[in-house]
Image (cartoon, rainbow, N blue to C red):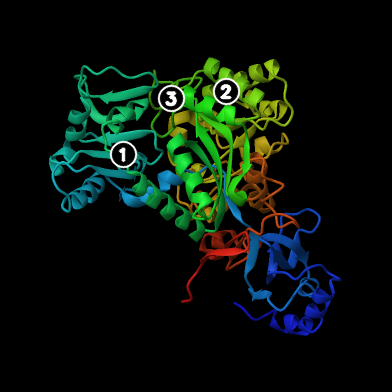
Amino acid sequence: MRGFLLGTLACALWAGPARAQAGGAGAPADLIVAARRIYTVDPDRPLVRALAVRDGRIAFAGSVREAMALKGRGTRVLDLGDATVIPGIIDAHAHLLGLGEALRTVDLTGTRSYQEVVERVAARARGLKPGEWIVGRGWDQNAWPDRRFPTLEALSRAVPDNPVRLTRVDGHAVLANARALALAGVTAATPDPPGGRIIRDTGGAPTGVLVDEATSLVERVEPPLSREETRAAVLAAIAEANRWGLTGIHDPGVEAPTIDLYEEMARAGQFKLRDYVMVAGDSDATITRYLRRGPQNALYEGHLWIRSIKLYADGALGSRGAALLEDYSDEPGNRGLVITGPDSIRTVAIAALRAGFQVCVHAIGDRANRWVLDAYQAALDSVPTADHRFRIEHAQVLSPQDIPRFAELGVIPSMQTSHQTSDMYWAVDRLGPTRAAGAYAWRSLLETGVVIPNGTDFPVEAVNPMIRFHSAVTRQDANGWPAGGWYPAQRMTREEALKSLTIWPAYAGFMEHAVGSLTTGKYADFTVLDQDIMTVAPERILDTHVVMTVLGGETVYERSAR
């Protein structure tokens, strides 16, 4: 890979140190990076061959010869040869602690049957004492031959002595075994909690599946991680994010104790990521605490931003908790769940506007998206505010009449392109073909003038950002299905897809002056790839590997040579 620029660099070496020492081009750089293609996502100079880094920030982006004018005696020169450099990748919706916890638990992603789930859990149980909890995540009944929700009998027979909680891939449902339900006191007499649903058999007994707010019935009796276990989980998640080229994330629904831990880690230099934290909005006391503190930007040398509140309007489509305007096509009589209604959203939004905070609301179904837009509109009527950048997280199923309202109100649709390629196999079953045309409607939204920050919702989806990029430009799975793409008119261009991983998330987090493009003065965050995702054949995008991840000029991940 390396070597194609060495001749150019050698020719420039004689002049670079002299000019730097003379001060004609400014102080020497700490690092000079050269590569065949460097996509800056800066409209003034979108494609360059070299970067110079000084004090953790971009000092110059342009030609190799110009960059070498900033070479001094202590400058490190990195020739990346045929590699491609892009701005540090930002995941606009990702659960950092959730990823850390998932790395510690039974991985159920990719299971092709309920029996496979049971076998993985039983294998974990063999190494545990009776009574110890088993936690897993990643099952998806839509990927099994029988697409109905599982029931607890097989799991309880295989693991009778350990309480088990298995979270569905979307995080909006759990499967518990009999031991876990008994510890939680969940019986046929237990009512559905507000915003939640206990799936029951024909006799009214719990089947083991709990949806949305009902999941807390079991989660509240599960021993929490200790502070040190949480720290270890966060460190593991940061390392995993760096491994996939991420330099930043937007982290929705973070509880106050976890935010306190993040700050402690960042002060100690242990937080190798830029995290735009969305405070969990499930407690009035927590909301009040952070609104009183006021917006916090670029804390601890740009590692934490705390200026946003996260709320939930509804559940998820896969577990039929997304709130729809009409019945689910595959479950007549069910229109989903209401977790936070429009009045509460409006109240929080008004308080946030007065405190200079952003609000980000999870809304997946078309009914939930409509009432969130209504609540935002009412709040903005009450407290007219320019550049508020309110967001809807997911904006997954939209009524055509609501699509223009995002641009009209200045609301950002924060979406996950990999959700589309995960859900497309069964989304039409849930929605029917007419409503499905308004699902994952990236092109329709972009044409109104909004931007779409792109995330994974990890650990719901894989961390790998190339899946997001590939989904955005093809609307196909890894095998090229369906031919031509699923509702292909909604695809993004490659330029839009790259922005959705970089500058658009930066904008959505009030961070565009610090990150998102390789522009002079911004943090030197960049990701090195082993092939050019802007020109390679679409079917080869997913073969792209991260060579290096650089945060503020510091290498936080480097792929080992093979």
Mark 3 closeness class: few <14, some 14–19, many ≥20 residues within 10 Å: many
Nearest the camera: 129 or 215?
129
Total number of numbered discs in the rendering: 3
Mark 1 closeness class: few <14, some 14–19, many ≥20 residues within 10 Å: few
Q: Are marks 3 and 2 in contact (CB under 8 Å)?
A: no
Question: Which badge, 3 or 2, comes first in the chain's sequence?
Answer: 3
Determine the image quadrant of residue 8: bottom right
Q: Which residue is mark 2?
A: 372
Residue 348 vertical placement versus 157 (above, below):
above
Q: Would residue 41 be seen by someone viewing this image from the given angle? A: yes
Q: Position of residue 326 (x, y in %)?
A: 48, 20
Q: Which mark is residue 413?
A: none
Q: Position of residue 476 (x, y in %)?
A: 52, 50
Q: Position of residue 509 (x, y in %)?
A: 63, 40
Q: Which residue is mark 1?
A: 224
Task: Kindly identify the residue that appears in the image at 39 percent across and 33 percent down.
Answer: 172
Query: In 3D space, how far apart are the residues under numbered discs 3 and 2 (Cα atoms)?
Result: 20 Å
Q: Would residue 365 be seen by someone viewing this image from the given angle? A: no
Q: Amino acid at mark 2?
A: Val
Mark 2 closeness class: few <14, some 14–19, many ≥20 residues within 10 Å: many
What SS does tag 3 mark?
loop
Q: Amino acid at mark 3?
A: Tyr
Lateral position of residue 103 relative to residue 16, left or right: left
Task: Kindly identify the residue that appears in the image at 76 percent across and 75 percent down.
Answer: 68
Q: Which residue is mark 3?
A: 328
